[in-house]
Image (cartoon, grey):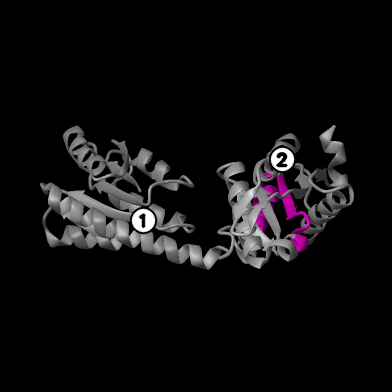
Amino acid sequence: MKVLVADGNAADLQYCEAYLKEWGFEVVAVTDGNAAYDLLLESDGPMLAILDWSLPGMDAMAICRAIRKAMKTRYVYFIVVTTHKETEFAVAAINAGADDFIAKPFDADELRVRVRAGQRICELEQGLRLKGTHDTMTGAYHRGAIMDFLQKELARHEREQCAMAVIFADLDHFKKLNNDYGNLAGDVVLREVAHRVGSTVRPYDWVGRYGGAQLLIVLPACEVGTAIEVAERIRETVAERPIMTDAGQVGVTISIGVLCLREQDFPTLGEVIQGADKALYRAKQAGRNRVEVASDTASAVV
């Protein structure tokens, strides 16, 4: 688990960092509040943060308030550390959005207990969030969540006039696979394909199960050339080796349709889905295990 430690005092920072690493945590250490805030906003930012009250730049209270307001996709557990021992400081920290409060000086045992408690809460909260947004079969985002991400990215695309792309990917001959190997083997294949796709796309792309054996992938800030490269990489990764199931090895391929939006393109959500789906249909008709780009973006490819 990744933990952020932010303290302007070098000795206190090293003390906390050393113990956290000894306990098996991945530690990110910074000396000012602005750097701490930026790290916490990253998509893979720390889930637990230990902040000194009097940080240079943004102080701990400002960070807590700002992150609570800005962060909607995950929860950050805040432990505020200060030389102040008065009750009113603890109350102020909790009111600002902190989860726990430790007065300096503190010993290693106390720190470990507080951090372990925070870790348990973070893991529980993360599990609950996954259940609310992810497909239980594949581990990818469920249809409602991925459509919500697509809608938000379309709004950002229109607002900022930045290129983006959408991919529809569908397993080839999935019904026959289920008939030949059984539904349990089909489930294993779906999970593994979703895992391979998720490990292939960029860290800030969104992968969701649209329905059946079909995945919807949203690629923010993505030009045509990059979108095609990502799609080809997905196709190659899925097909490169068979998937092991209890019924034996299963070779799989995937057909892909790509819709790319240039800065001046402002389609509706329905038009985006329809365009990507038509490209996927052409990939199926052309023999499967291939990538097709929506015809209305052909001028952007050349």
Image location of residue 27, percent across then percent down: 31, 40
Q: CA distance from mark 1 to mark 2?
A: 37 Å
| Residue at x-position 61% and y-position 47% | 196
Q: Is residue 123 one of those drawn in magenta?
A: no
Q: Say the numbered circle drawn on residue 54.
A: none
Amino acid type at image mark 1? Arg
Foreground label between 1 and 2: 2
State the residue in front, 73 or 89. Answer: 73
- Name the residue carrying label 1: 65
The residue range painted magenta reads 148-176
Q: Quadrant of the C terminus?
A: top right
Amino acid type at image mark 2? Ala
| Residue at x-position 24% and y-position 43% | 20
Q: Is residue 208 above or below residue 12?
A: below
Image location of residue 205, percent across then percent down: 61, 47
State the residue in front, 84 or 251. Answer: 251
- Name the residue carrying label 2: 227
Q: Is residue 151 one of those drawn in magenta?
A: yes
Upstream in sequence: badge 1 or badge 2: 1
